[in-house]
Image (tube, grey):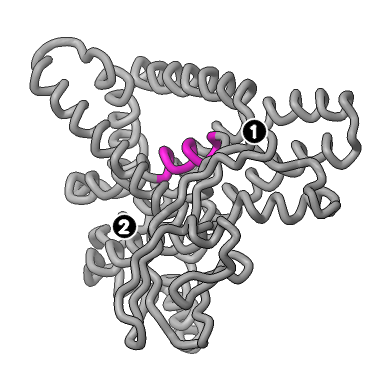
Amino acid sequence: MNIEKSFFLRNALITSILLTTLFSFTPFGFTFASDDTGEEFNPGDMIMHHVTDAYEWHFFDIGDTHVTLPLPVIIYSGENGLKIFSSAHFHHGESSYEGYRLDHGHLVAEDGHEFYDFSITKNVAALLMGSLIMIFIFLSVAKGYQKNQGKAPKGIQSFFEPIIIYVRDEIVKPNIGPKYERYLPYLLTLFFFIWIGNILGLLPGAANLTGNIAVTMVLAVFTLIATLFSANKNYWGHIFNPPGVPLALKPIIIPVEIIGIFSKPFSLMLRLFVAITAGHIVILSLIALAFIFHSVIVGFASTLVVTFINMIEILVATIQAYVFTLFSSMYIGMAVEEHH
C-alpha cells in the first residue's frame, strides 16, 4: 500500500506542477481598464462575473475584442412554445430577442409570463465537458486493463490506477465494510467528478462548476438517497429508538437524530460550495489588486502570491473530492452496518 500511496502523491505532484505552470503563463482575460463610458474598474463586479453562471462562455479579451463562446438558449413556455436561439443575440447590441432579455445575468420574459429555462449555460457546458472527460478516462483505463492483462499498467492507466486503488482501499472499503463493492462505482464517479470539476474550475476562463450550490446540492441529494435506500433495521433503530438513552430523553434525542439525517448531506453541500467559491474569490481579489493600485510592483507581488495560492487550490481541489467521498462513504457505511 505504501507503493500505491507514493504513486498517488507522485501523480498529484506532477499534475500540480503542470497546472500551476499553465496558470502562471496563461492570461485570465479580465477587462481591467476603464471602458469607453469612463467607468472605473469594479473588482466586485469582476469577481461576481467570474464566479457566477452565464449564458455565454467568456475566455479572455484582446484589446477591445471579447473572445467568447455563445451558448444555446432553450426556452419553453405555454405562451410562446419552444424557443431555441444563440445567446449571442443578447451581446451584440440587442437588449432583447424573441421576447426575452437578460436582467443582471438572469433570463426574463418581457411580458412577465412564466417559462421553463433549459439553456446550456456555462456551468452546464462545463458539466458536460467534465462528464466527457470522465467517460474518456474510464474507457481508456478499462481498455488498458483488457490489453495489459497480467502486465504492468501503461499510459493513462498507470496514472489513474493508483488513485482508483487508493479511493477503494483507503476511503470506501474501511468505511462501508464487506458491502463496499455495491457502492464503489458511485463513490468513484463522485470522487472523479468533483476532482475533475475542481481542477477544470481553476483553469483561466473556466466555469465555477463545483462552486455552484445547485451542483453540490444534487451531489449531496444523491448521497442522501443512497444512504436512505441502503439503510437497514439497525440504522433506523438507532434513529427512532436510540439504544442506551433514558426514556425521558428520547423525545428530545429522536428529533435530533432525524434532523441529523438531512444535516449531514447539507453540510456536504455547503462545504464543497464554500471551499471552491472562496478559493476563486481569493485568487480574483489578489489579481484585482494590481488594477486597483495601478502599480507594477503590486502586480508582480500579486502574481507571485496568486501562483502560490493556485498551488494550494490544486491541493484543496483534491482534498475536497477526498472529503466529499469520505463522508459519503461514512454515511452509507453507517446505514448498512449490521448490529453487533
Mark 1: give few (<14), some (14-19) or many (20+) Cα within 10 Å.
few
Q: Which is nearer the eye, 211 or 118?
A: 118
Q: Which residue is mark 2?
A: 332
Q: Which residues are magenta?
A: 194-203
- Residue sitting farthest toward the front: 93
SS state under label 1: strand
The relative height of residue 184 versus residue 247 in the rendered view (above or below) is above
Q: Residue 340: percent from the left, percent from the top?
A: 26, 58
Q: Residue 190: percent from the left, percent from the top?
A: 34, 47
199 in the magenta segment: yes
Q: Which is nearer the eye, 71 or 8?
A: 71
**Residue at x 75%, y 26% (from the top left corner):** 303
The relative height of residue 248 versus residue 277 in the rendered view (above or below) is below
Q: Which residue is mark 1?
A: 62
Q: Is residue 185 left or right of residue 51?
A: left
Mark 2: give few (<14), some (14-19) or many (20+) Cα within 10 Å.
many
Decide which of tag 2 and tag 1 comes sooner along the chain: 1
